[in-house]
Amino acid sequence: MTPMVVGEDLPNIPWQERPADCGTVVWRHSANPIIPRDALPWSNSVFNSAVVPFRDGFAGVFRVDEKTRRQVLCAGFSEDGVHWRIEDKPLTLAGADPEISRFEYGYDPRVCRIDDRYYVMWCNGYRGMPTIGLAVTDDFKSFTQLENAFLPFNRNGVLFPRMINGKYCMLSRPSDPGHTPFGHIFISSSPDLTYWGCHRHVMGPKQPWECTKIGAGPVPIETTEGWLLIYHGVLTTCNGFSYAMGAALLDLERPWKVIARCREYLMCPETPYECMGDVPNVVFPCAALVDAETGRIAVYYGAADTSTGLCFTQVDELLNHIRAESEV
Ligand code: BMA
C-alpha cells in the first residue's frame, strides 16, 4: 500500500519539482539559502528555525544570532513560505514562574501545532545551562512561557503533534554543557506539559555518518506506516563535526520502537552555503511542512550555522527509501 500522510492538505506548500539531473530522494530549493544571514540589520545569522502553516500563509520562530553573538528567537511571517518577514525585535515570553523567566539565551526552536495552539520548544539557558524551554502562542505575537520540560543538560526537544495514548510526547537529546560528543534520542510523556516521565530510549548513533550523536529535527510527521522522524546525525572528522540529515520510521502507538531507519544520510553538507559559514559543514533540519493530498514535504534546515535552506522530498519515496535500506 502506498504510504500516506495522516494530516491536513496544504495546497500552498512551497514546492519545486526535483531537477531532471537529480537522483536523490531529497533535493534543494534553487534559491537557497532562502533566508540570508543578514535578514535583519542586527543579525549575524538566521538559521536552525521552525515554521508552520498559519492563517492563509505561514509563521515561524527563527533562531537569530545577534551581531553581539547573543542567541535570541524572533517570530516571522510569510505568504509563500519562501520570502519571510522576520520581526525586528526578539520575541518576549510572559507568564512564567520568575525563577525560570529570565531569558539567558535561546536557540534551535521547533514549533508544533496541537489542537489549534502553537507550542514552541527551544534550547533554553537556565542558570547558564541548556535545557528544553516551552511556550505556547495563538498568534506568534504573544508567547506564554511554560515550565522547562527537563533538567539540564538537554537539547533538541521536539513535541509530537498529537497526544499518544492520552499523553503529550516529547523527544529530546540529553547532552552536556559544551559541544556534546555523544547523544541518543529519548522520548518522554506528560499528562499536562509540566510533569514529564516514562522516559524511553528511541535510538542512538548507528552508522558512521552519525556516529558521534543524533538529535530529532522537525516535529514527527504522522503517516499510515508510522511516525516519520527526520533527524540530524553528526560525524567527528579530523576537522570537527559534520552534520547531515537522516530519517527513521517510529511505531505509531509506541514511538520509542524504531520500525525502519535509513542507512545512508539523506542529505549532507555539499553546497558552498552548507560547507562554509560560522560553523562549516552543517545541515540542521528543524521544521517540515507537509501536504497530505500530494505527500509533498518541504524541510527547513540551518546551513553552516549561518543561513536557512529549504529542501524537498515526497513521503512515499522517502518511506520506501528508508525501508529499502533500513538497518534498525
Ligand atoms: C549544535 C547546536 C546547533 C548547531 C550545531 C552545529 O550543538 O548548537 O545549534 O547548529 O551544534 O554547530
Image (tube, rainbow, N blue to C red):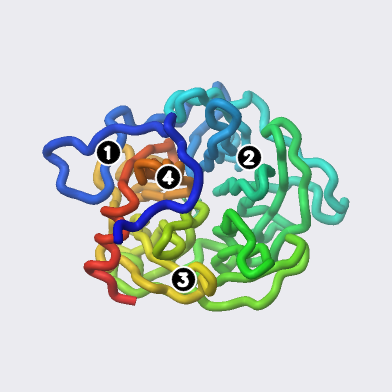
Q: Position of residue 244 (x, y in %)?
A: 34, 56
Any part of residue 301 in sight: no
14 relative to 206, above or below:
above
Question: Which residue is the site of mark 3?
Answer: 251
Rendered-image quadrant of the N terminus:
bottom left
Residue 241 x, y percent position in the rendering? 37, 59
Residue type, label 1: Pro
- Give the CA distance from mark 2 to mark 3: 35 Å
Q: Give the labeled residue for mark 1.
A: 272
Determine which residue is flagged by label 2: 72
Look at discs 3 and 4 and give the one toward the viewer. 4
- The kind of secondary structure element at disc 4 is loop
Q: Which residue is mark 4?
A: 292
Of labels 3 and 4, earlier in sequence is: 3
Circle 3 residues within 10 Å: few <14, some 14–19, many ≥20: some
* Helix, strand or loop for disc 1: helix
Compare marks 1 and 3 and give the one earlier in the sequence. Answer: 3
Cα distance in 3D space between marks 1 and 4: 32 Å
The CB of the residue at mark 1 lies under 8 Å from ligand 1: no
Which quarter of the figure has residue 248? bottom left
**Of helix, strand and loop, which one carries label 2?**
strand
User: Residue 303 location in percent, x, y?
Assistant: 39, 42
The residue under the point 77% across, 53% down is: 146
| Label 1: how many Cα within 10 Å (few below 14, some 14–19, many 20+) | few
Camera-nearest label, 1 or 3: 3
Q: CA distance from mark 1 to mark 2?
A: 25 Å
Name the residue at 38% across, 44% down: 297
